[in-house]
Every structure is written in C-alpha cells, then in structure tokens.
Amino acid sequence: MNIGDKRNGKGGLWMIPEQFALEMVRHGWHLIDNVIWAKVMTDEDGTAEGACMIEPVQRRLNGNGWEVFYRFVRDPKTCYCDSCAVRLPRDNCPTIPYLSAPLMSVVSSIDGRSCQNVWRVPMGQTRYRHYAVFPSSLVERPVAMTCPMKVSGDGQVMVEREIEMVEYDEGRGKKRAIGKYTSLGEYNENRSKQMTGRVDTARAYVPRKPKTIGWSPEVSEPAPGVVLDPFCGTGTTGVVALNMGRSFIGIDLYEECKRISIERCKEAVDIMERMKLDPWQVYN
C-alpha cells in the first residue's frame, strides 16, 4: 500500500498513512514492512541526490521528498514471501539476478544480503497525463517478493523457494566477532561494575548466505500468480507484473485510464513474445 499525506487548514499533517496503518491493524492485519520511497536525499554537506516536486513554503520543510509503502498480511507465518528475490549483491560472491533486464531493472542477487527498507528511486515519467506518476522499478521489488510467480490451477497452492543457509568466504582475510557487554559506568553493592547489553561476549561471526535447493510443492499445471492494483492509473504496475511473469488485474475509476492501461499491457505482452522472453525459465 502506497499512501500519501494531506495537510489541514493550518498546515499540519493529518498523518493519514499512520492512521490508515493503525486502522488496518485494528481490523486484523499485520504490518510486516514499512518501506520509505526516498525521492531525494540530502547529505550533510548540503548536496542532494534525486529530485521531487518544488514546494516554496515558509516555516517548514519541503514534504515531498519521500513516501511510504506498507506491507500488510493476514498471517505472518503462512504468507508468501520470497526475500531472495530482492536480496542485494554480496561481497566476494557472484551476482545471480532474480530476473535480469529487460524483465526487471532493479539489481538483485538471490544469494545476496538482506534488502533494507529505504529505497532511493527517482520520480517516474510518462507521456500520459496522470497525477501520480511513479517509475516501474518502484513496484518490481514488491511484486518479486510478495507475489508467487506460479500457483496451482485453482490458485490455492503457491510454488515457494526452498533454501538452506551455507557458509561462505567474505574475503575479508580475518574473522569478525559480534556481541559485547557494555558497562553502565556504575557499581553495585559488591563494588563490581554493572553490565548490560548482549549476553554473548565477542561471539565469532560465521558468514552465511542462502542457497536455493529446490521448489515446493510440485505443481503439475501451474498458473501465474496474480497482481491486483485497485487504483491502476495508466497501468505501470500491470506492465511490471506481466514483464515478471505474473497475471494482472487493474481497476480504475476513469475510462481513459482503463484504455491506456490495456494499451500498455498489450504492448508489454507483444514485446515479450517478439523477444521470446519467458520469466519462468529464467526464474527456475
């Protein structure tokens, strides 16, 4: 869920994303991930990377530099999640992409390190008139991670990745340790310093990475997983879903948006057929 905020008559924020998230939790959903879409980031030296809409206001900051993404699930233990699809390249390891260009533009490595929840993605551009323009790369990670590429014919069984964590050489040349006691700087009644922090003292760190060992369960006649966008606009999410081997359902209030979405989705399918691109073959 990508949702923005609004201001009241005095300029204060309504806190719509936060209130929406709390209401979802009250209705039985679990907020698992909150991602920051950073359109522009300002460094301590005053330089800025990226761009956002200009907001010439006084007595507050430009509030257009970021937006939030929420990931809600009904059951955290059973929901589909392929975190390997969005992992980042790891030092001293070859990069094995989940899907490479042109199927996916975001760089990934299925045996890499965990992806953080702050994404710097530039604003999108389109030749179509639309008020909420976002780049296709912004929705690639959510689709890859949370929508299965294949399900059973009735849509009930998801084909999931099976992994095991294996040791690997970081290439650092020396061992690392994690976990240390820290002192409060005070003495207890026995005149010994009180300690706090982790209970493991300088425990040896053994680097491990995920290794794909198979897929489960086996599905005889798999069908593509389905991506639903209830506010599809000009169909950017649909194009991404189709490029990544999923099916797509789009809903929008405006007839013109419907026409443009269908046009763009058909174009995406035609390109993949001409180039003989099959995401499932790359993925598997």
Image: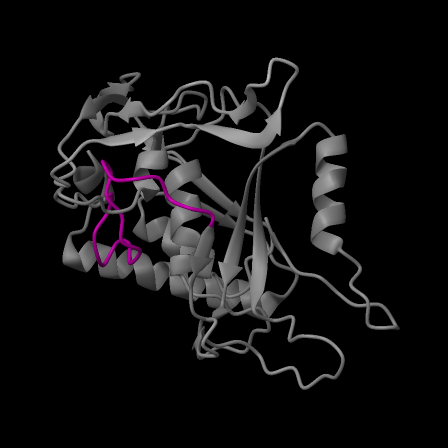
Q: Residue at x 45, y 21 (%)?
A: 156
As drawn, which residue projects farthest toward the front?
A: 191
Q: Position of residue 164 (x, y in %)?
A: 24, 20
- On whether residue 3 falls in the magenta region, the answer is no
As drawn, which residue projects farthest toward the right?
A: 9
What secondary structure prevails in the magenta region? Answer: loop
Q: Position of residue 101 (x, y in %)?
A: 21, 57
Q: Quadrant of residue 257?
A: bottom right
Q: Residue at x 66, y 15 (%)?
A: 189
Whether residue 111 is visible, yes or no, is: yes
Residue 50, above or below 265: below
Q: Quadrant of residue 254?
A: bottom right
Instruction: Using the image as rendered, state which of residue 171 and residue 164 is in the foreground.
Output: 171
As drawn, which residue projects farthest toward the top?
A: 190
Q: Position of residue 162 (x, y in %)?
A: 28, 21
Instruction: Using the image as rendered, state which of residue 39 and residue 207 is in the foreground.
Output: 207
Whether residue 149 is visible, yes or no, is: no
Q: Residue at x 43, y 69 (%)?
A: 122
Q: Position of residue 282 (x, y in %)?
A: 18, 41
User: How many numbered discs sit on the rendered protein?
Assistant: 0
- Which residue range is magenta in the image? 98-117
- Is 71 on the left or on the right of 88, as rendered? right
- Is 19 on the left or on the right of 205, as rendered? right
Q: Residue at x 72, y 75 (%)?
A: 60
